[in-house]
Amino acid sequence: MRRLVLFVWACVLLSGCRPWFLGPPRDKGLDDEMTTYYVGLIFHGPTWTPDTSPDVKRLQEEHLLNLQKLARDGKLVLAGPVTDSGDLRGLFVFRTESLEEARALTDNDPAVKAGRLRVELHPWYGPKGLYVNTRPAGAAVTTRGR
């Protein structure tokens, strides 16, 4: 009986059939189409208030300028606010070499430095090629090297 079981296993393996308990085969090209990003969930920070003073407006402008720079540098893939009124204020998606690099970028944000926002970072395995279009509306599209 043992020889029969070994023979059946050998036939299955040599025939290229995949046993059901191993699950579906993984697409070998998947890793070529996916990459690790770092998602930052943005929450109210310890100094957040609903205030709209000139200082808060200035800080928000500095925050947005920082995001634009990170997008131009290719580090920030996506960013935006959430539209409900909870503690979660928005999200970032970074394309960096490491979680530590993404953390350094968020720690350097003016609103985070001021304590108005805090960011919780998580690795995320997603499709390659995500990007932010940093061209102003109506700007001409150009191609490089094509």
Image (tube, rainbow, N blue to C red):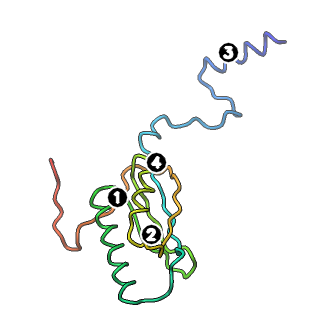
State left or right for residue 11 relative to residue 126: right
Question: Mark 4, residues whose alpha carbon is within 10 Å: few (<14), some, or many (≥20)?
Answer: some
Q: Nearer the viewer, residue 64 or 15?
A: 64
Q: Which numbered disc, 1 or 4, marks the residue closer to the eye?
A: 4
Mark nearer the N terminus (1 vs 4): 4
Residue with the mark numbered 4: 36
Kindly give the residue lying farthest to the right in the view shown: 1
Q: CA distance from mark 1 to mark 2?
A: 23 Å
Mark 1 or 2, nearer chain start: 2
Q: Kindly indicate the quadrant of the structure image that contains residue 10.
A: top right
Instruction: Give the mark toward the camera: 2 or 4.
Output: 2
Q: Do the residues bearing badges 3 and 2 touch, measured as CB atoms within 8 Å? A: no
Residue 134 image offset from top left, x and y in percent = 27, 65
Say what secondary structure mark 2 lies in.
helix
CA neighbours of label 1 inside 10 A, class few (<14), some (14 to 19), many (20+): some
Give the residue type at disc 3. Answer: Ala
What separation in Å lies between label 3 and label 2 (alpha carbons)? 60 Å
- Labelled pair 4, 3 in contact (Cβ < 8 Å): no
Q: Quadrant of residue 4?
A: top right
Mark 3 and mark 1 residues within 8 Å of each other at the beta carbon? no
Q: Which residue is mark 3?
A: 10
Which circle marks residue 112 in the picture?
2
Residue 32 x/y as whole percent: 41, 39
Q: Could you say whether the residue bearing mark 3 is in a helix, strand or loop? A: helix
Q: CA distance from mark 3 to mark 1?
A: 47 Å
Residue designated by label 1: 131
Q: Quadrant of the N terminus?
A: top right
